[in-house]
DNA sequence: ATGGTTGAAACTCAA
């Protein structure tokens, strides 16, 4: 079964691109981020037409996450626990059942956190802490777990074409990277790093300053797997060709094939 | 150092 994550940067503006990619890649489950749509405006019909069940957690203008699944989607939960009054739609999980075995899948859109030294960066660190607590709870249960999404974290210097350009950016701050490393320390495998030599593999290229043309990219979209899920991992990929399509998102899909 | 681009929705913000 193939599980993918993609920061789509506006699901309504990107619907034709999304449908083209769904037809091409035919993933079983897709975690979307930055849908930038209220739930009522989400383009359910054309996606359902390709055989997907859909769960959405949107808000007006910004953020927004969704799960698409060719298999039954149960026990959907919206929002990341741990902070009263957090209205930002950045987290949705569901239980996907295939052949009698269940997999807990989360679509996560971690705060960007720029600029550093502001309440935005503090919110990012707090959100990472809340995600860690949620993961700990899940790992204590019997379910296999996949946390996929835009983590807005460059884990290591090899995950950026020009790491020196990111030293003052929230995506490359030591505190945020350490928080990401705590997730892998809990036993979650960074799928791409586990299977491939992931140096020089990027998932995001800025729209500005010809970043794509210069391959000035970063790897910030990740698929994290619990030990039982990692045992089933057979292949990982980044669909970088999608970045060259017309009207692309600034992110490309990342996927993992599980037995 | 600055400016470079995009989406959503409102004439600016977040990324």
Image (spheres, helix red, strand yellow):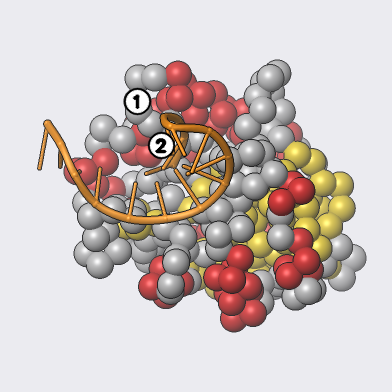
Residue under pointer 2: A177
Q: Callout 1: 10 Å neighbours few (<14), some, many (20+)?
A: some
Residue positioned most to the bottom: A24
Residue under pointer 1: A116
Q: Is residue A208 above or below residue A30?
A: above
Please report the residue visible at 78 percent of the width from the left and 74 percent of the height from the top. A49
Disc nearest the viewer among 2 and 1: 1
Residue A63: x %, y % from top left: 58, 41
Residue positioned most to the right: A100
Q: Is residue A28 above or below residue A146?
A: below
Residue A96 placement: quadrant = bottom right
- From this viewpoint, is residue A19 visible? yes
> Considering the image in quadrants, where does the N terminus of chain A appear?
bottom right
Residue A24: x %, y % from top left: 59, 81
Label 2: chain letter: A
Disc 2/disc 1 C-alpha distance (Å): 14 Å
Please report the residue visible at 52 percent of the width from the left and 64 percent of the height from the top. A253
Residue A42: x %, y % from top left: 71, 54
Please report the residue visible at 75 percent of the width from the left and 75 percent of the height from the top. A50
Q: Nearer the viewer, residue A128 or A84?
A: A84
Q: Are the residues under marks 2 and 1 on the same chain?
A: yes
Q: Secondary structure at mark 2?
A: helix
Q: Secondary structure at mark 1?
A: loop
Please report the residue visible at 34 percent of the width from the left and 38 percent of the height from the top. A172
Q: Nearer the viewer, residue A5 or A33?
A: A33
Q: Callout 2: 10 Å neighbours few (<14), some, many (20+)?
A: some
| Labelled pair 2, 1 in contact (Cβ < 8 Å) | no
Label 1: chain letter: A
Residue A19: x %, y % from top left: 63, 73
Which badge, 2 or 1, comes first in the chain's sequence?
1
Left or right of residue A235: residue A136: right
């Amino acid at each position: 079964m193939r599980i993918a994550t993609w920061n789509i940067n506006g699901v309504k503006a990107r619907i034709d691109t999304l449908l083209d990619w769904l037809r091409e890649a035919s993933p079983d489950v897709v975690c979307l981020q930055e849908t930038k749509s209220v739930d009522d405006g989400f383009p359910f019909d054309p996606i359902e037409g390709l055989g997907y069940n859909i769960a959405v957690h949107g808000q007006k203008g910004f953020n927004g996450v969704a799960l698409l699944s060719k298999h039954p989607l149960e026990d959907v939960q919206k929002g990341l626990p741990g902070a009263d009054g957090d209205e930002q739609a950045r987290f949705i999980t569901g239980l996907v059942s295939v052949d009698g075995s269940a997999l807990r899948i989360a679509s996560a859109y971690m705060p960007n956190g720029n600029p550093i030294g502001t309440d935005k960066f503090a919110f990012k660190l707090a959100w990472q802490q809340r995600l860690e607590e949620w993961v700990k709870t899940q790992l204590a249960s019997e379910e296999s777990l996949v946390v996929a999404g835009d983590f807005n974290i460059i884990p290591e210097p090899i995950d950026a074409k020009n790491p020196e350009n990111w030293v003052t950016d929230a995506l490359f701050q030591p505190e945020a990277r350490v928080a990401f490393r705590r997730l892998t320390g809990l036993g979650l495998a960074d799928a791409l790093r586990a299977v491939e030599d992931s140096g020089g593999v990027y998932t995001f290229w800025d729209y500005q300053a010809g970043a794509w043309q210069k391959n000035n990219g970063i790897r910030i979209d990740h698929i994290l797997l619990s030990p039982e899920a990692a045992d089933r991992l057979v292949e990982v990929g980044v669909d970088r060709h999608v970045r060259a399509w017309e009207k692309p998102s600034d992110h490309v899909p990342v996927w993992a094939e599980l037995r």
